[in-house]
């Protein structure tokens, strides 16, 4: 075999080995994704042992139609909205808009709080007891953005705008 071709093959092989090693490290250290069981969105957060729970969670969440969930037993099929970010803050924003009759809410210091999901929840069913919430803590913003995008692209929840996925 040509000496230069052998050299090129060795470079490609070494690059592949380094890439695989990096991927193995990511896989080993990546958080184990555990979704919370769906619970009433407007109730207090369920206790999850000694962890920080939702207060510090950076990850993805689902807003679930309780009637559909009870009918199908399927979280994916009954999910109306998927999002990402600081989970507690995002959840609170959706709840605020919902509780404001599905309308954005002006802040006393200026600005507004808006939530397309909160508006659509209210339009779909204005009974707050109809809404469940589930979330997972990924501890990484980029990973949460990508996971949200993959979930929305795959599951196509009714309330999500695909163009906003991962943003």
Image (spheres, helix red, strand yellow):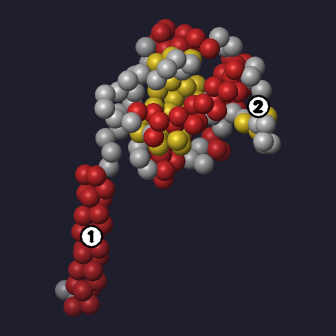
The Cα–Cα distance between marks 2 and 1, rounded to whole angstroms, is 51 Å
Residue placed most toward the observer, 3 or 139:
139
**Residue 90 appears left or right of 112:** left
Circle number at residue 18: 1
Which image quadrant for residue 117?
Answer: top right
Residue placed most toward the observer, 112 or 66:
112
- Label whose residue precedes the other's in the sequence (2 or 1): 1
Which image quadrant for residue 164?
Answer: top right
Residue placed most toward the observer, 103 or 164:
103
Query: In the image, which is nearer the foreground, mark 2 or mark 1?
Result: 2
**Residue 97 appears left or right of 4:** right
> Is residue 21 visible in this depiction of the protein?
yes
* Viewport quadrant of the N terminus: bottom left
In the image, residue 5 above or below residue 140: below
> Is residue 132 visible in this depiction of the protein?
no
- Determine the residue positioned at 40% across, 33% down: 53
Residue at the extreme left: 1
Residue placed most toward the observer, 107 or 96:
107
- Determine the residue positioned at 52% across, 17% down: 43
Residue hosting label 2: 105
């Amino acid at each position: 075999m040509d000496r230069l071709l052998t050299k090129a093959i060795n470079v490609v092989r070494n690059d592949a080995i380094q890439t695989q090693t990096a991927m193995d490290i990511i896989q080993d250290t990546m958080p184990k994704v555990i979704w919370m069981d769906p619970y009433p969105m407007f109730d207090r957060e369920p206790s999850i042992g000694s962890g920080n729970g939702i207060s510090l969670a950076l990850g993805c969440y689902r807003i679930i139609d309780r009637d559909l969930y009870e009918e199908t037993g399927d979280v994916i099929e009954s999910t109306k909205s998927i999002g990402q970010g600081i989970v507690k803050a995002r959840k609170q924003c959706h709840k605020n808009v919902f509780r404001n009759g599905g309308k954005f809410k002006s802040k006393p210091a200026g600005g507004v709080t808006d939530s397309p999901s909160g508006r659509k929840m209210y339009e779909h069913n204005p009974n707050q007891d109809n809404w469940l919430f589930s979330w997972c803590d990924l501890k990484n913003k980029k990973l949460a953005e990508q996971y949200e995008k993959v979930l929305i692209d795959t599951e196509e929840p009714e309330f999500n705008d695909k163009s906003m996925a991962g943003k």
